[in-house]
Image (spheres, helix red, strand yellow):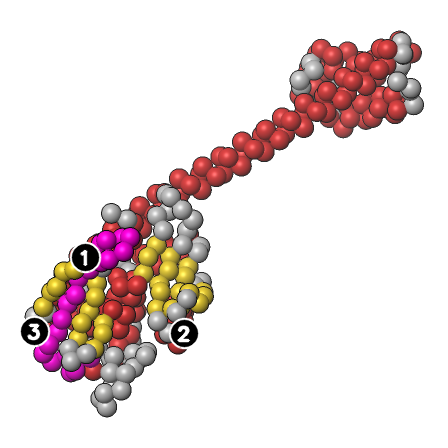
Amino acid sequence: MSFSMNIKDEISRIDEGKTEKIAELSAIVRNSGTIDNNLKIIIENNSVARRVFKLFKEIYDVTAIITVRRRTGLSNNLIYILTINKKYQDILKDLSIYDKYNNYLEIPHDYLISDIDDIRAYLRGVFMTCGSVNDPKTSRYHLELVVDTNNYAKFINKILNDLKLNSKIIRREKNYMVYIKESEKISDFLRLIKSYNGVMYFEDIRIYRDHKNMTNRLNNCEQANMDKIFITANNQIKDIEKLKKHKLIDTLEPKIKEVIEYRLKYPESSLSELANIMTNELGYKISKSGLNHRFRKIKTIVSKLSD
C-alpha cells in the first residue's frame, strides 16, 4: 500500500463531532460526487468508501448503495460507487454544496468551516478524495490536492496559506493542483489532518535523509580539503625538487632550509599539522601563516629558475 493510501486509511478512522463530520463529508461529496436523478460518490480507497457510508448513515440516517467496479486501464484498481437515492437534495444543501435555491456552490458557505476543527475536517475530506503525498523514502517531498476549478483551488490555497503552509497553485491539464513542496510544511499538513502515524513515518524518514545528506556534504568537504592539502603539499615538494636540481638548498637561509627539511619529512601533512610538528620538535612557536610565508619565498625563488 502506498504512503498516500496509508494516510487515507488512517484518517478515515478518526472519530469527530457532528460539525466536523459534516465539514469532512462536504469536501468528499464536493470533490467526488456527481448528480443525475441521484447522488453518486466515486471513491478509490476502500477505507474512505466505508467512511463515507458510515457518515451518511450517522448524520442523515441514509444507507448508501455500494457498487464495486474494476477500473479499466493500466491501474486496474477497484473503485467504489456510493449511490444516494433518498433525501440527497436536502443533504446537498446541508453540506453547503447547493444553496436554498438549488444553485450549485463552487465554494461552501463560511459557516461550514467556522473554526479550526471544522477546517481540519474539511481539509481531511479534500485529501481523502483528491490528495496524494510522495513517500519521503523514495522521492522528492511533494504533497498535492487536485481540484476541478481555479476558484476552488484559490479557496483551498487560501486556507492552507492562512495556516502558513506555503502552498501554491499550478494548472494541470483540465484541473488545478494545489501543492506543498517544503518537507516541514508537508509534515504540518499531515499533523493538521490528524495523520499522526503518517507524521511519525514522514519525520523519521526526513530526519534520516537530512542526516544522510549532511554526512555526505561533510564527507565531500573533508575529501575536498584532503585533495587541497595533497595538491598544496605536492606543489611545495616540486618546488623543493627544483631547488635541489639547481643545487640551491645550501645557499638558502636557515629558516627556509628548516621548512624544506620538515616538508620532505612529512609530505602528507597540512600546513597546520606541519606547524604543530615543528613547534613541538624545535621548541619554539611556528604558525601556519609563518610557514606559508616561507613557502611563498621558495615559490618566488623557483619562479625565477629555468627548467
Q: Which residue is mark 2?
A: 150
Which quadrant holds residue 303? top right
Give the residues in magenta.
71-92
Magenta-colored stretch includes residue 287: no
Q: Which residue is mark 1?
A: 70
Instruction: Tell whether 139 sits left or right of 119.
Output: right
Q: What x and y, as percent, mark residue 224?
A: 62, 31
Q: CA distance from mark 2 to mark 3?
A: 34 Å
Badge 3 crowding class, 10 Å Cα cut-off, few under 14, some 14 to 19, many 20 or more, is few
**Tag 1 near tag 3, CB within 8 Å:** no
Badge 2 crowding class, 10 Å Cα cut-off, few under 14, some 14 to 19, many 20 or more, is some
Q: CA distance from mark 1 to mark 3?
A: 28 Å
- Residue at 29% x, 49% y: name it: 3
Q: What x and y, as percent, mark residue 211?
A: 44, 38
Badge 1 crowding class, 10 Å Cα cut-off, few under 14, some 14 to 19, many 20 or more, is few
Q: CA distance from mark 2 to mark 1?
A: 31 Å
Q: Depth-wise, is mark 1 or mark 3 nearer the camera?
A: 1
Amino acid at pointer 3: Asp
Mark 1 or 3 closer to N-term?
3
- Using the image as rendered, state which of residue 244 and residue 107 is in the foreground: 107
Circle on res. 61: 3
